[in-house]
Image (spheres, helix red, strand yellow):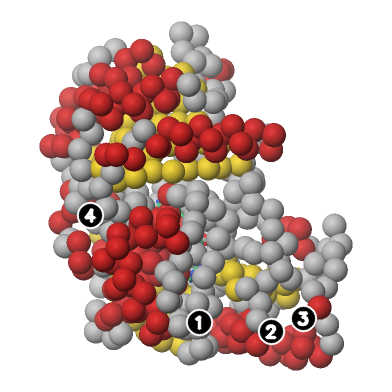
Amino acid sequence: MVGELAPALNGSALASFRDAFRGPIVLPTDDGYDDARRVWNGMIDRRPALIARAIDVADIASAVRFGREKDLPIAVRSGGHSLPGLSTCDDGIVIDVSRLTGATVDPERRTARVNGGALLGELDDAAQAYGLACPVGVVSHTGVAGLTLGGGVGRLQRKLGLTIDNLRAVELVTADGRQVRASAEENADLFWGLRGAGWNFGIATGFEFDLHPVGPNLTRVLLIHPFSAAPELFAFFRDFAATAPWEISGLVTTFHALPAEDFPPEVAGQLVAAISVTYCGRPEDADRDLAPLTAYGKPVVARVQPQQMAWGHRVYAKSVYVDSAPESLIGALVDEASAMPTGGSAFIGALGGAIASVPEDATAYTGRSAAFEVGVDCTWDDPALDADFVSWARTAMKGIEPYRTTGVYANSLGDAGEDVARAIYGDAKYERLRALKRTWDPDNVFRLNQNIRP
Ligand SMILES: Cc1cc2nc3c(=O)[nH]c(=O)nc-3n(C[C@H](O)[C@H](O)[C@H](O)COP(=O)(O)OP(=O)(O)OC[C@H]3O[C@@H](n4cnc5c(N)ncnc54)[C@H](O)[C@@H]3O)c2cc1C
């Protein structure tokens, strides 16, 4: 669809921006506009005034200056996977850094340098070429930038720590267009804030990570039980996770066994309960360490399942961190799951291990001592069902609210706003982040994120 040019972009303003900016600029009047504005979550349908597709750091700096001069809302986009659609906007400028791809590995030092628009798959592939890995997320088309700046939770984290625990340095363009580097030695305060609330302080153009020997094969196990076993299965997983080796990460969850042809007749199309774990230790130890799980109950299905989370579906998610998961919490969650619409899931995921071995104050990420993440997520396609899914998810999580501890994983939330940001960081860290925001972005130029108000 061909749209109109925003008034701020008429006349010579756009022409002089075009002179300064070397990458493509996509306007509502251009044919490629609808493709360029599309983000991962199909619920998000925003119409930016322009999309500036940076090809280098200088482009990013000039786009920030242009957005500020024209007083346009500025959205920053990397992998485009933000659940609440924080990497796009109506009537503003999207600074799209997704062309700044690439990851290079130094196998001797076991480090990687990753450009600000790279996807997880690039980092994984570059590192695995040397038998190395950085603990990042589970889906290869997620952006390194958005994930890392919020913490980074995945299948290796109980063993190797959060993504930010393996972050050595970040290069970024700040709100006043400067290029700055932050690490434990340079701008250490900024580095603290970048590790958990990082989207607030600038546009990351490069990351340096530590790598570890991992793989090439991990053991993944999916054990599907009938839904009637859910209360016992959830309690069993809770107890197992409390003492499980750090090499094991995963969750206990519920979902509808669809597409039906992928499941045996006794559960096809039905609501089921399942344990899904990944083991990153030595393959020869996997059977021993996973034995308590594989020996438990009578799973209907036991297999490895690939991850599939394609672009364009409508998605909503909500979760909290808890210190423990008593029977009453499990009962409330399983009750809600029994009434959930097809496409929903309710889960308890294991945290702890190396995540909890870093002191709470070491980074802006909040909730290191939490034992579990408890949450719901929903995927559907029909816009007429938006209200059903969102209201089911919100109601389900209301019942879990009394059990929550300080902290929520910022990247797994479908909502944003000041109250959400306060819940993510807790009052004390939120105030420390505000002070940092006043130093680095006092005008709140970077506000389309889990925003810290200066
Ligand atoms: C399919 C899927 C799987 C996921 N799996 C995991 C997982 O395993 N582990 C996990 O921890 N999270 C996971 N997530 C959540 C994910 O971490 C967040 O959605 C994250 O924000 C995605 O980053 P992005 O770069 O793709 O997103 P974008 O939508 O591009 O950006 C997200 C936020 O980061 C900001 N941002 C983007 N690029 C930059 C930059 N270069 N500098 C500064 N700010 C920037 C944006 O402004 C926005 O606020 C998953 C999400 C999806 C959709």
Between the residue at mark 3 and the residue at mark 2, the CA separation in whole angstroms equals 7 Å
* Disc number for residue 368: 4
Q: Which residue is mark 1?
A: 443
Which residue appears at 25% of the width and 43% of the height? 322
Label 2 is placed on what type of residue?
Answer: Lys
Q: Is residue 239 left or right of residue 154?
A: left
Q: Which numbered disc, 1 or 2, marks the residue closer to the eye? A: 1
Q: Earlier in the sequence, mark 1 or mark 4?
A: 4
Q: Residues within 10 Å of mark 1 (few under 14, many from 20)?
A: some
Q: Mark 3 or mark 1, which has the lower sequence index?
A: 3
Does the closest atom of ligand 1 sit within 8 Å of the Cβ of label 2?
no
- Whichever of labels 3 and 2 marks the residue nearer the N terminus, that label is 3
Lower position in the chain sequence, tag 4 or tag 3: 3
At mark 3, the secondary structure is: helix
Q: Which mark is residue 8?
A: 3
Q: Is residue 102 left or right of residue 439?
A: right
Residue designated by label 2: 70
What residue is shown at x 59% (from left), y 32% (from top)? 388
At label 1, which amino acid type do we have? Asp
The earlier-in-sequence mark between 1 and 2 is 2
Mark 4 vs mark 3: in front:
3
Is residue 19 shown above or below 287? below
User: Where 428 falls versus 121 (above or below)?
Assistant: below
Closer to us: mark 1 or mark 4? 1
Residue 69: x and y in percent read 65, 87
- Closer to the camera in the image, 68 or 380: 68
* Cα gap from disc 3 to disc 1, whole angstroms: 20 Å
Number of the front mark, 4 or 2:
2
Q: Secondary structure at mark 4?
A: loop
